[in-house]
Image (cartoon, rainbow, N blue to C red):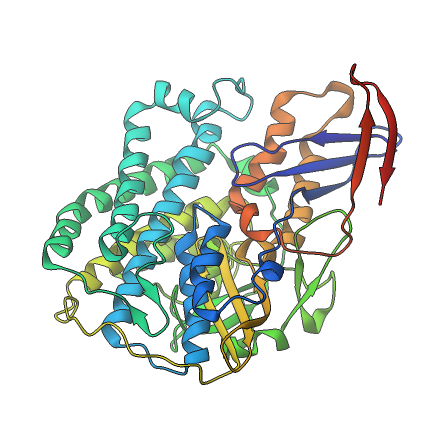
Amino acid sequence: MKEIVISPITRIEGHAKVRIFLNDDATVRDARFQVTDFRGFEKFSEGRPYYEMPGITSRACGICPVSHLLASVKACDQIVAVNVPRIAMLLRRLMHMGQIIQSHALNFFHLCAPDFLLGMDADPEIRNVFGLIEKQPELARQGIRLRKFGQEIIENVAGKKIHSNEWVVPGGGKWPLTKERADYLMANLPEALTITLKTIAMFKSWLSGCTEEVETFGDFPSYYLGLVTADGGLEMYDGNLRIVDNDGKIVVDQVDPNKYFEYIGEAVEPYSYMKFPYYKPLGYPEGMYRVGPLARLNVCSHCGTPLADQELKEFKKLGKNGIVQSTFHYHYARLIEVLSCIETAKTLLEDPEILSERVCRRVYVNNNEGIGVAEAPRGTLIHHYKVDDQGMIQKVNMIIATEHNNLAYNKAVTQVAQKYVKAESLQEGMLNRVEAVIRAFDPCLSCATHAVGQMPLEVQLVDSQGKLLDRKIR
């Protein structure tokens, strides 16, 4: 069987490739998204004390460490059986708003905008962030400024922009927010809001020229999963799980995250180190669902902030029954979430108790199990820990946001490859479109490479000239 291999996929976080399988007539039969590295945080965390888990698991990624910190510490909160002080919860939420803002800004401006502005068929030597800086310096600057604001929220709450696990502890946070830092964030918030509103308007003007991409970039029916508030609103830090189908019907609602395993199964395949989660009632692989910005806006009824709610109404008009199924619209959804996070950050900073010093409780091991669920930039993130009576980790299960979309990745790359890839006249732009649909999902593969499954080992013996003498595969 003939095949085309795209390796590595560029402008994503982590390492992966796409294999495109061809029919005898050189048309595309199928395609697979393959994650090619293994990290295994679930296994090497065993034997560590529970309170080290936020610091350990946040090292899974340098782009979304806050999401891991929060999901992890929420699981630890359950192990010690405490209700986190209200102020600590507000500060955790504020920190998470910064996480969403900075991560979404990175994806939109630096990883995906080169495709929009420089063209899918542009020379790859210029179709990158440096080409964007040259052609659209003001837009590139705005992306840097917006991401900087998100990182500064994290830094002013927790002391560091990346791996800020010193502040996040089971039972709350280590120190309060100072007035000086709160005032700094409030002073810089208007610029971030202005950049976001301008970018949304600009992106909507681009859509008229992207009709073909909208129709072919992962435009297929699926289920959608995300956290919602008690009244069905957008929720990033807490809340319960909701699943809707492609017709907008709520399949399950207000599911306690502690019961996630009753609805989500996990499969593995020999060709990837990333799990394949699926909706249990439909089985594998029929139980495909999507998470992340597109899914979150599909499952929620409102964002809860005025400007984002107005934009959400426009977004839902792009689909049937309010369900937008084209993967291309992850970009639009991402910008709406940034808008919502900026508005939410302002509300949190204006809370009259935000500077209170009551941010932590004393903690002891009271339960042998804890589950923490939060919405990472890329989707629903689940940390599930089991400990002994001394608090030592016995078992870890992590379902990473990126993993939820694994079945959808494979369907999306197949759809795009079948539309664009012509093996008899292969061109750079064809293959870039296959990569671009992956970038729309914004996978974080360093976080997601935990599927043990079949662990191949290849040993090669070569001589001093580089000639292969022997090769063994286990």
For residue 252, above or below residue 268: below
- Looking at the image, the residue that sits furthest to the top is 465
Q: Residue at x 85, y 34 (%)?
A: 23
Which quadrant of the structure image shows residue 146? Answer: top left
Which of the pair 54/239 is nearer the observer?
Answer: 54
Q: Position of residue 415 (x, y in %)?
A: 68, 42
Residue drawn 27% across the image and 56% down it:
158
464 versus 459 height, above or below: above
Residue extending farthest bottom: 366
Q: Quadrant of the N terminus?
A: top right
Q: Is residue 362 above or below residue 435?
A: below
Q: Is residue 415 above or below residue 256?
A: above
Q: Answer whether residue 13 is visible to the viewer in this image.
A: yes
What is the x, y in percent for residue 21? 80, 36
Instruction: Name the spot of residue 13 as percent of width and height, x first.
Output: 52, 41
- Quadrant where the image shows the C terminus: top right
Q: Quadrant of residue 93?
A: bottom left
Q: Is residue 300 visible?
A: no
Query: Residue 198: x and y, percent?
Result: 27, 39
